[in-house]
């Protein structure tokens, strides 16, 4: 019992001595440092005392610890803008091209000479232009009607107008027009003249024949569908 008491007293004495020594060392360290660093606990080599977590020891006296290893300034945090919300692209399907109904007509009075069913050079050029106008039409129907002037019998002029429309039909087919498009072709003879009553009067003469040139014509009409671009 007595021995145990002596040991406790001895341990208490040692603890007090250590505490006094620690305080004395700290006081000695403070006396060796500048006034601006007295708040930090240092040893004689100016090494800052740290605990097991790397934190500096300092007293409660003096100004705040200076910036450095014991009081690092916080690093500025980069501000990263929030990403813009994802917006799915809107895909608009292109509208399919729609067919457009068209009607192309030709009423040419330069196709034939008097009493002839052979195309004039100007007549071929006129039909070539017509073929160019109908390019791109996917399907269609063609109506062609031939005419003649008043000179000659009714039967003769009817046959002449039919030969003229047959010539136009054959020429268009030779230029690539579908034969199946030619659904109607006919001759009207002298029944539907272009000239008006009272015009081009008189007997058969060069001037009268030239005046009646508009009556020697062929009317062509194509109806079909073209894809609109």
Image: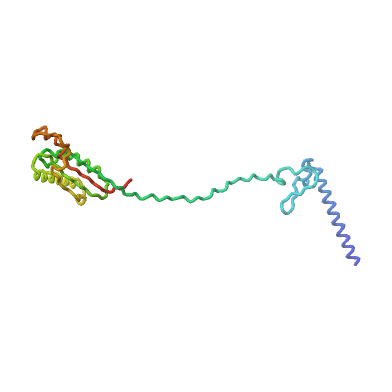
Q: Quadrant of residue 215?
A: top left
The residue lying at 24 percent from left, 49 percent from top is: 140
Q: How is the image coloured?
A: rainbow
| x and y percentages locating residue 115 in the rendered image | 10, 40
Give the answer, above or below, for where 88 lies relative to 35.
below
Q: Quadrant of residue 113?
A: top left
Total labels drawn: 0
Q: Residue furthest bottom?
A: 1
Between 10 and 103, the one nearer to me in the picture: 103
| x and y percentages locating residue 136 in the rendered image | 27, 46
| 62 left or right, relative to 228 | right
Image quadrant occupied by the N terminus? bottom right
The residue lying at 86 percent from left, 54 percent from top is: 17
| x and y percentages locating residue 159 in the rendered image | 10, 46
Residue 122, visible in the rendered structure: no
Between 45 and 166, the one nearer to me in the picture: 166
| 24 left or right, relative to 56 | right
Residue 63, visible in the rendered structure: yes
Q: Quadrant of residue 125?
A: top left
């Amino acid at each position: 019992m007595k021995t145990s008491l002596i040991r406790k007293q001895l341990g208490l004495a040692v603890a007090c001595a250590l505490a006094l020594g620690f305080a004395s060392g700290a006081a000695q360290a403070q006396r060796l440092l500048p006034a601006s660093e007295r708040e930090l606990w240092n040893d004689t080599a100016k090494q800052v005392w740290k605990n097991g977590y790397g934190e500096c020891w300092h007293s409660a006296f003096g100004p705040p610890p200076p910036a450095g290893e014991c009081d690092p300034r916080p690093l500025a945090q980069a501000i990263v803008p929030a990403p813009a919300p994802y917006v799915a692209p809107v895909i608009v399907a292109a509208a399919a091209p729609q067919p457009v109904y068209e009607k192309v007509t030709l009423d040419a009075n330069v196709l034939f000479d008097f009493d002839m069913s052979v195309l004039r050079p100007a007549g071929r050029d006129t039909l070539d232009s017509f073929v160019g106008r109908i390019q791109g039409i996917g399907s269609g129907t063609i109506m062609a009607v031939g005419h003649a002037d008043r000179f000659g019998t009714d039967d003769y002029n009817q046959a002449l107008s039919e030969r003229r429309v047959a010539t136009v039909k054959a020429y268009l087919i030779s230029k690539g027009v579908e034969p199946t498009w030619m659904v109607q072709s006919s001759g009207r003879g002298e029944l539907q003249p272009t000239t008006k009553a009272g015009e081009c009067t008189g007997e058969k003469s060069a001037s009268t024949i030239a005046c009646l040139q508009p009556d020697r014509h062929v009317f062509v009409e194509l109806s079909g569908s073209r894809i609109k671009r």
